[in-house]
Amino acid sequence: MTDHQNDDDFVSKSQRKRDMDALQDLGSELVELSKDTLKKMALPEDLLSALLEYKRLTAHGAIRRQLQYIGKLMRNVDPEPIQQYLQILKGESSEHIAWQKLLERWRDKLMADDANQPLFLQSFPEADPKQLHSLVRQSRKEKLDNKPPKAFRQLYQLIKEQIPEPGKPRIWNKDEEEDEA
């Protein structure tokens, strides 16, 4: 037996190649996203610039080489948060779907009965009671008058602000970083 066969960290050349191909495929998924979405993600600067450069290229050979370069850069990045974010964008994350349904249930409860407002405020004390009451009232009025559901959507956003989304990777925002400094 050779020394590397006894080593617990031994990874075959074929497995390393499969891992690199998987990272390149992940990079291929990233290039399909819009520039704005890519800029919102917590990606290293070199990877982000490579992805944006890919979008600028038109020659087939250059595109292929850039995709390989993106795959190489992906080796230095933890792929798990990126995969989770892509699942959320595709609507494949069961945690994200459950969270959305929770938000909708709360909105339906609040719309159904005023007695649910104190329950919501007890569960989420940071919520503004006046704003909550106003949005529920406006939503009901919109529904009765067959108007566009503007307040109904605002109510959903208010609930969304109070209930954090589980499993969503942190999206880097330059403005937030400046505020913290």
Image (spheres, helix red, strand yellow):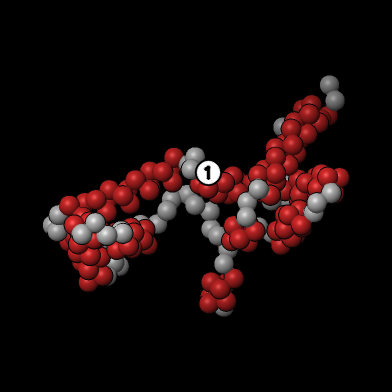
Residue 66 locus on image (x, y percent): 81, 49
Is 39 displayed left or right of 71 in the figure? left
**Residue 155 visible, this orientation:** no
Q: Nearer the viewer, residue 88 or 5?
A: 88
Residue under pointer 1 = 90
| On screen, residue 8 above or below 132 | above
Residue shown at the point (22%, 71%) measured from the top left: 130
Residue sitting farthest toward the top: 1
Q: Residue 173: which quarter of the image? A: bottom right
Residue sitting farthest toward the front: 146
Quarter placement of the N terminus: top right
Is 81 displayed left or right of 160 in the figure? right
Q: Nearer the viewer, residue 1 or 105?
A: 105
**Residue 165 visible, this orientation:** yes
Residue shown at the point (60%, 49%) measured from the top left: 82
| On screen, residue 26 above or below 129 | above
Residue 6 locus on image (x, y percent): 77, 27
Q: How many marks?
A: 1
Q: Nearer the viewer, residue 125 or 67?
A: 67
Residue shown at the point (65%, 44%) measured from the top left: 29
Is 156 displayed left or right of 44 in the figure? left
| Amino acid at circle 1 | Lys
Residue 159 locus on image (x, y percent): 32, 59
| On screen, residue 20 above or below 6 | below
Residue shown at the point (81%, 31%) measured from the top left: 13
Residue 43 locus on image (x, y percent): 65, 57
